[in-house]
Image: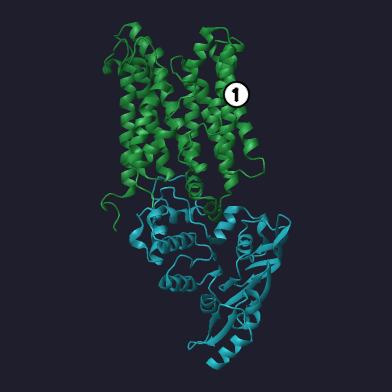
Chain colours: A cyan, B green
Amino acid sequence: MIEARGLGVARGGRWLIRDAGLRVARGEVLGLIGPNGSGKTTLLRCLYGALAPDAGEVRLGGADIGALPRREIARRIAVVPQERPDDSGQRLREVVALGRLPHRGLMPGLGAGGAAAAQHALERVGLGAMAERPFASLSGGEAQRGLIARALCQEAPILLLDEPTNHLDLRYQHEVLGLIRSLGLTVVIVLHDLNLAARYCDRLALLDGGQVIASGPPEAVLTPALLEPVWQVSVTTLPRRDSGLHLIFAERPLDGQNQELFHAHH
Amino acid sequence: MAGPSRAITPLTRDAAILTALTLLLALTAMLCCGLGPVSIPPGTVLRVLGHHLLDWPVQGDWPASTDAIVWLSRLPRVLMAIAVGATLALAGAALQAVVRNPLADPYVLGVSAGASTGAALAILVFSGTGILLLSTSAFAGAVLAMLLVLVIGGARGEVVPFRLIMAGLAVGYALTSATSFLIFASDSPEASRSVMFWLLGSLASVHWITAQVALAVAAVTLVFMAFASGPLDALAAGDETALAVGLRPGAARLALMVGTSLAVGVMVAGSGGIGFVGLVVPHMARALTGARHAILLPTCALLGAIVLLLADLLARMLFAPQEMPIGVVTGLIGAPLLLLLLRNAAPRP
């Protein structure tokens, strides 16, 4: 459905991502993981054509995304970027209704401007009662859910999210990711927290130094052998009761002493 | 927290605001046609207008001088004030969203400074006094200044708001200096005075043809802006947001800036660089209707027209028969209004 082949983005003589490839099937939740500066956001921005790659291409339903009009892309891909919108005095309802823009003709309307669609999207993220609040007055978690509502209001089959659980407390992290999973959309999501990635993604792509060094189901990617060299911390995986797995990290790179400690634990 | 009073939907509220402002505009325009050195009662004003526009009443029972005052002297000026006020306010609101800066005014691209230099050149160097030479020269100056700002500000192929504002400031200061130099180097105090008068803005020399052109441009601007209201909402929220909802921020910004600056150039060429209206009126309108451009823009147009009509009325009445530059009045009214809005503005979190 959406596919990147041999993507390369260079800035100032350095490759931010290089020969990066991934494929997302319809209805799949793909997690992009990797340390800071590994190229997750750059790769994500290429996927919706916000960045034109210096090498390779992104294909959306068989077409090169670089050749598609921006509006057409927005009808098929909704994005929750990391950036908060500037405070332009807009109310939550107005921010969410921006999601209708790619569907609207240019005809201006004095009407409520997609009010019904916006209200429906707000109710899905549990903010139905806050529609009239100024966006700038929302808490971090409310604002994040508001942006997800805007993406839902866009009614695109593909949803891209850049670290949507930042600024969220534990409860909302799970609520937001559970919500995203329940939508039945094709999702690509950048996640910092590997345990959340393990729990909510069908497949993971692990980035390091701008390259996708591993991809597959969480059990295949979240192994100490793959993770430890990338993050330079020791990793222990524990099976969860509800299938799936849980990771435990130690602050130092794995050395002999730590290994003994962990073995003693088990 | 529930929305503010559920009984009134946003739609009916918006419609009520627009209706009220439209009535207020008609009333103000009527008042301005009637007031002046020769006071003409509103009934007579209405009948003169009816006679000319609708051929009703067919026969006038008023003196020819009354007819001339209303139809030839005051009405063009009133229409010009409406066109200029509406366009400046619309442009201010749009540019504040486009460069994402509440302090932007319609002249961010150096349009006013360019027009001033053009006008000064026409008056001082070519000793032009004809309205056509003056307006053409001012408009050419405005367009050239805008192009210069775009070339400097967009030098890296991207139209970034911060670079544009800086380029606009630089070009503006340079051209203001050039204008001052022209005035300084001129040996005709009379001509210098007329440049100064022009710089501060005035509707005193408006003819029917100027008013008609300005009205047509204002109408086109209003329609252009109505189509742009959705993109303006997105641009105001930021480039990432605009991209996400299907807009190329660079291209949209460029189209909006060039479109509005051209319209403002026409207004400046006809009436001089009237300050404050384009900066203050959008803030007043936002306080009234909120940030959504579909309602904000028509509100700005109506409010801008009303404010400039009143400012022009004061400019010609306060020291009658002496005319004051309208820029002096808009500055005197605008500054306290800005402070008032600042006081009432909710503190940002």
Q: In screen coordinates, is B143 left or right of A151?
A: right
**Quarter-wise, where is residue A234 in the image?**
bottom right
Q: Amino acid at mark 1?
A: Gly
Residue, disc 1: B141
**Quarter-wise, where is residue A157 in the image?**
bottom right
Locate residue B148, reporting x and y percent. Answer: 63, 31
Locate residue B228, reporting x and y percent. Answer: 50, 42
The image quadrant where one finds the C terminus of chain A is bottom right
Please, is residue B139 above or below residue A57 in the view? above
Q: In screen coordinates, is A32 left or right of B75?
A: right
Please name the residue shown 47% across and 47% down the image: B233
Locate residue B16, reporting x and y percent. Answer: 30, 40
| Secondary structure under the numbered disc 1 in the rendered image | helix
Residue A250 visible in the current orientation: yes
Please name the residue shown 49% across and 42% down the image: B227
Closer to us: A151 or A81: A81
